Amino acid sequence: MELQKRKLVQMILGFFLGRVSLFGINPIGIAFFASGYMETGIRIPLGISVLLGMITVFPVETVLCHMMVMTSVIFVIDFLEKRNIRLHMLQTMFLLLCTLSIITFIRLYFFSYDNLEKFATVMEGVLSIAATRILYDGQHFLLERKRGQYPGNEELLSLVLLGMFVALGHGITDADTGDLITISNGELVTSNI
């Protein structure tokens, strides 16, 4: 029963991290999926929860691009696991970068973007690689910790970043404008950071 609660928490986190928009890109949702895919268990439901979060925020072509990246990662990893080849974190990050880069360049070719959007789209691959490694420690701690175990420095940093990104996905802050949204005396107040 405890394991089912942890998987449910992972799916809820996936939904909120799928909603994170950093200047119109979402490297966090893809990174959370890739780092969660390394853990056994809920691989397909995790991808679905991340995509459901993305659908609520991003345009259709962005969601389709990320869905193709997730699907290709699933197929490649399953193909290799059937041949008893287990990927490590670095190899999974490289696979994520390759698939995201190929699909991003295809998207940039077919749709017209200005130079800032092109730069942000290319940076999405770089940011998703860094976020995959960072978010893996927090996910591993949430799913595999034992009662009474305290997080180490890397796990603690990863858990703090997970909480921060969930706050971004929940709508507490708006990363596109840099505003901090707070509730003061029962009213929504927006303050510039």
Image: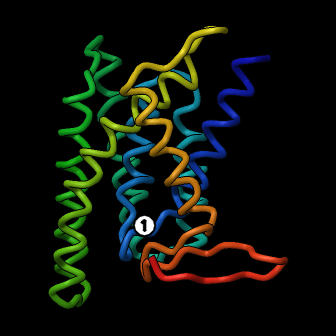
Left or right: 180, with 154 as reference point = right
Viewport quadrant of the C terminus: bottom left
Residue sitting at 36 percent across and 75 percent down? 23
Q: Nearer the viewer, residue 87 or 134?
A: 134
- Amino acid type, callout 1: Leu
- Reading the image, the residue beneath label 1 is 64
Q: Horizontal placement of 115 versus 183: left or right?
A: left
Chosen colour scheme: rainbow
**x and y, in percent, of residue 22 in the image:** 39, 69
Q: Tell me the residue at 84%/77% (across/down).
A: 186
Residue 51, horizontal then vertical, whole percent = 54, 57
| Relative to 85, residue 53 above or below | below
Residue at coordinates 28% horizontally, 23% vertically from top-left? 80
- 110 horizontally vs 38: left or right: left
On the image, the x and y values in percent for residue 125 come to: 22, 56
**Label 1 neighbourhood size at 10 Å, few (<14), some (14-19), many (20+)?**
some
